[in-house]
Image: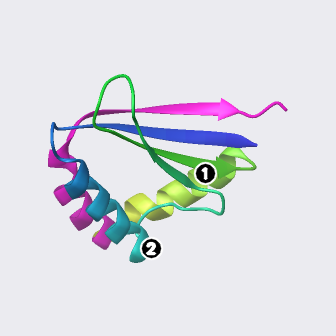
Amino acid sequence: MYIFREIFHLQFGRYRDAKALLDEGIQKDLLLHPTGTRVLTDFTGEGYRLIIELPYARLSDYETDLKKELGGDQWKDWYKRFKPLVRFSERDIMKQVV
């Protein structure tokens, strides 16, 4: 099992806007959300982070889904609205061993 953790460091005070867009993207099926997806925010450390954890059995499954997500015209329009809310982002890819 692999966990893909997408970490978005948001502009100060823009969490609600980003969360609303995230909800819209999931509702319209524009964003990856396999069974077991978790959406998290922080209570300590650097503030205004939105973290999405995506579980996949194989790396190839993630790559296939990601190509579908990034190729959609509606996703591109959604991303244009989401991008200005983010200072920077990072991705962790972890393998679950136990």
Which residue is denoted by mark 1 in the rendering? 62
Can residue 15 be seen at all in this image of the molecule?
yes
Please name the amino acid that badge 2 sits on.
Asp
Q: Is residue 33 left or right of residue 36?
A: left
Q: Residue at x 33, y 70 (%)?
A: 24
Kindly state the secondary structure of the residue where label 2 is placed: loop
Q: Which three-letter amino acid code belongs to the residue tagged 1?
A: Tyr
Question: Which dot, 2 or 1, sits closer to the camera?
Answer: 2
Name the residue at 25% across, 57% down: 79
Q: 24 left or right of 94?
A: left
- Structural crowding at the residue carrying mark 2, measured as other residues with C-alpha within 10 Å and reported as few (<14), some (14–19) or many (≥20): few
Image coords of residue 89 (percent x, y):
33, 34
Q: Position of residue 95 (x, y in %)?
A: 72, 32
Give the residue furthest to the right: 98
Q: CA distance from mark 2 to mark 1?
A: 16 Å
- Tell me, yes or no, if residue 72 can be seen here: no
- For label 1, the SS is helix
Query: Is 31 rendered above or below residue 58?
Result: below
Left/right of residue 64 with respect to residue 28 in the rendered view? right
Q: Is 6 drawn above or below residue 71 in the view shown? A: above
Q: Circle 2 sits on which residue?
A: 29
Of all residues, the one furthest to the front in this rendering is 43
Q: Point out the stretch of residues depicted in magenta.
A: 74-98
Label 1 neighbour load within 10 Å: few <14, some 14-19, many 20+ = some
Quadrant of the image containing the N terminus: top right
Tell me, for residue 7, which label it has, or none. Answer: none
Front residue of 59 and 41: 41
Which numbered disc flags the more N-terminal residue, 2 or 1? 2
Q: Quadrant of the C terminus?
A: top right
